[in-house]
């Protein structure tokens, strides 16, 4: 396993930012999903010694909502899978979401930010401050209906992924919760929901873009519960990418912290992943904000100190667990 990142373009400035911080694998922000565009981005990154492994495909509202035109959207996803294979990518990251709370964080529901160390602020969620009675386009959706819609989608895209040898990595719904805005989240209870989702289709190309932070957000005791979940899916080769972030708190009340100050022992997670033979990227996801830490114009908003710090943190943990493994072996 190795440090990675996401949501970067392939400009010289962005690539040099990654390389000087030890990052040589990533998921790119691209300006098209045709073969030529994907290939151009992969080749542009390679000129700097950076490997473009995956891209995020655009979120499709109609699929999660089971709208009349969802089959057309699914056909589009199948086309992107074929294009990714032709362009030489390893996989695609995607979201299967039903709730899109457009005025409360969209696909990622949040409440007001909280203060953090050094004048930074943290993304947070507190159910008591969230307008949970409000309804959005999805209306009320049960967990059973959510899984029926997920199965409909997966049964159509995963055979195409298998044929093209493209890993399809689904991100968890953020945050997991029994119900938000009338929608029962498919990834709650977390362990049970992820198991069920992973078993909707049987394929080595069906797995997760697994966010440690999101999983922790849905647990009563993340420090004790999360390591077991990570180990379970890592051993079953269902993790295709890892968002390696930490939180302070628990179900319905949490704060996204710097990785070294949350409730979860990230060294323990790195060790579990190493021992299970996880072989892909560990990457930062969200990062605290600070008014002095602003990306230059014209590049990814992740060209910031906050991400540079996290790259170093992740690199050090990977080196530590690998060194320990060699010494004990």
Image (cartoon, grey):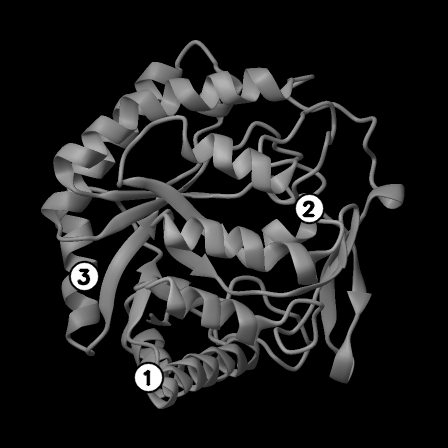
Disc 2 target residue:
218
Distance between mark 2 and mark 1 Cα atoms: 36 Å
196 lies above or below 103? above
| Residue 266 percent across, percent down from the top left | 57, 72
Label 1 neighbour load within 10 Å: few <14, some 14-19, many 20+: few
- Left or right of residue 183: residue 85: left
95 lies above or below 184? below
155 lies above or below 100? above
Distance between mark 3 and mark 1 Cα atoms: 37 Å
Dot 3 or dot 1: first in sequence order is 3
35 lies above or below 145? below
Residue displayed at 76% across by 50% down: 220
Label 2 neighbour load within 10 Å: few <14, some 14-19, many 20+: many
Look at the numbered disc 2 and give the secondary structure of its residue.
Answer: loop
| Residue 240 percent across, percent down from the top left | 35, 52
Of all residues, the one furthest to the top in this rendering is 68
- Left or right of residue 66: residue 54: left
Is the C terminus in the top left, top right, bottom left or bottom right quadrant?
A: bottom left
Residue closest to the eye, 5 or 238: 238
Distance between mark 2 and mark 3 Cα atoms: 36 Å
Disc 1 target residue:
329
Residue closest to the eye, 77 or 1: 1
Residue displayed at 49% across by 36% down: 195
Q: Which mark is residue 42?
A: 3
Label 3 neighbour load within 10 Å: few <14, some 14-19, many 20+: many
Dot 2 or dot 1: first in sequence order is 2
């Amino acid at each position: 396993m190795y440090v990675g990142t996401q949501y970067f373009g392939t400009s010289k400035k962005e690539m040099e930012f990654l390389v000087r911080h030890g990052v040589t694998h990533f998921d790119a922000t691209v300006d098209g999903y045709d073969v030529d565009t994907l290939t151009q981005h992969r080749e542009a990154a390679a000129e700097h010694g950076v490997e473009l492994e995956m891209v995020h495909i655009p979120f499709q509202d109609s699929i999660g909502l089971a709208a009349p035109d969802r089959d057309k959207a699914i056909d589009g996803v199948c086309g992107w899978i074929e294009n990714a294979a032709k362009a030489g990518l390893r996989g695609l990251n995607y979201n299967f979401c039903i709730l899109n709370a457009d005025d409360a964080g969209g696909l990622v529901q949040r409440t007001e930010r909280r203060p953090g160390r050094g004048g930074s602020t943290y993304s947070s969620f507190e159910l008591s401050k969230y307008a949970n009675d409000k309804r959005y386009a999805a209306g009320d959706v049960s967990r059973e209906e959510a899984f029926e819609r997920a199965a409909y989608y997966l049964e159509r895209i995963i055979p195409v992924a298998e044929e093209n040898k493209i890993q399809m990595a689904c991100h968890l719904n953020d945050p997991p919760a029994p119900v938000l805005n009338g929608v029962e989240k498919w990834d709650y209870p977390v362990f049970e929901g992820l198991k069920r989702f992973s078993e909707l289709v049987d394929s080595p190309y069906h797995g997760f873009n697994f966010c440690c932070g999101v999983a922790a957000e849905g647990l009563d005791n993340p420090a004790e519960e999360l390591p077991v979940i990570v180990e379970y899916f890592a051993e079953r080769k269902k993790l295709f990418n890892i968002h390696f972030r930490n939180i302070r708190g628990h179900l319905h009340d949490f704060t996204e912290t710097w990785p070294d100050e949350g409730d979860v022992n990230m060294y323990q997670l790195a060790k579990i992943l190493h021992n299970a033979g996880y072989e892909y990227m560990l990457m930062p996801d969200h990062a605290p904000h600070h008014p002095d830490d602003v990306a230059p114009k014209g590049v990814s908003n992740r060209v910031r100190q906050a991400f540079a710090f996290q790259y170093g943190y992740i690199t050090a943990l990977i080196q530590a667990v690998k060194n320990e493994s060699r010494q004990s072996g």
